[in-house]
Amino acid sequence: MDYLNLTTKILVYSYDEASDSIKKLVDEAKKAIQTSYSPYSDFKVGAAVLLSNGEIVKGSNQENAAYPSGLCAERITLFTANSGYPEMPVEAIAIAAYHDGGFTDAPCTPCGACRQVMLEIENRYKNRIRVIMYGNDKIYEVASVKDLLPLSFGQEALGEKP
Ligand code: THU
């Protein structure tokens, strides 16, 4: 019997330290918050996806009186990107959240279901997706969705060719 030790490398930096392209993507995610429909949680989330052709696709969370019928900003944005540009790999996604009158101090980290969807997209296009999680205090960045979802379940378990 033994332990399996898994390590995750998360890059931590401030907005001011970010490159211009990351700043732009974060700014777009923040802008997307304006379209959030979140009367139930009042937790507004915006996401911006960078495609490999340079295009940026934005989206926000959309809620529903039947709570589970709503959807997170990340999945809305990624599905919009994939349906609009089915041939285009995703290079990066930035996520930001607004609550209690301001952007959150802590980085907005995606829920488990969104991580699973991101993983499928990473596998589908055979292209690692940088995930940039914005907070006022600091930004977290991982180089691949796999860093956010260790021991994941993917197509390979089904014997499908990813
Ligand atoms: N939400 C997102 O859109 N993304 C996240 O990463 C976390 C949660 C949404 C879902 C729901 O509309 C609200 O935030 C509160 O959970």
Image (spheres, grey):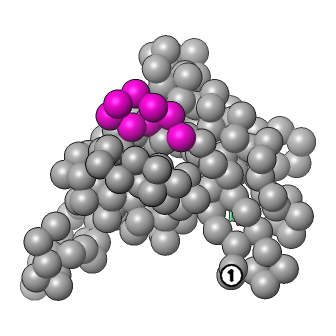
Q: Position of residue 41 (x, y in %)?
A: 82, 65
Whereabouts is ligand 1, in terms of quadrant? Answer: bottom right
Q: Secondary structure at mark 1?
A: helix
Quadrant containing the C terminus in the rendered view: bottom left
Q: Which residue has dot 1 on it?
A: 68
User: In terms of depth relative to the viewer, which is nearer, 131 or 65?
Assistant: 65
Judging depth in this view, the residue of 49 and 96 nearest the camera is 49
The residue lying toward the viewer, choosing from 143 and 87, is 87
Looking at the image, which residue is at 79% across and 75% down? Answer: 64
Indicate the position of residue 43 as horizontal and vertical percent values: 78, 57
Occupied quadrant, residue 3: bottom left
Q: Residue at x 62, y 32 (%)?
A: 28
Image-based side of 92 in relation to 72, left or right: left
Q: Which residues are magenta?
A: 50-57
**Amino acid type of the residue that numbered disc 1 sits on in the rendered structure:** Pro
**Is residue 94 something that shows in the picture?**
no
Q: Is residue 45 above or below residue 58?
A: below
- Residue for point 55% across, 22% down: 23
Side (left or right) of 3 relative to 152? left
Q: Quadrant of the N terminus?
A: bottom left
- Report which quarter residue 156 is drawn in: bottom left
| Residue 11 in view in this figure | yes
Asked if residue 52 lies in the magenta stretch, the reply is: yes
Residue 75 located left or right of residue 99: left
Q: Report the residue at 76% width, 39% height from top.
A: 103
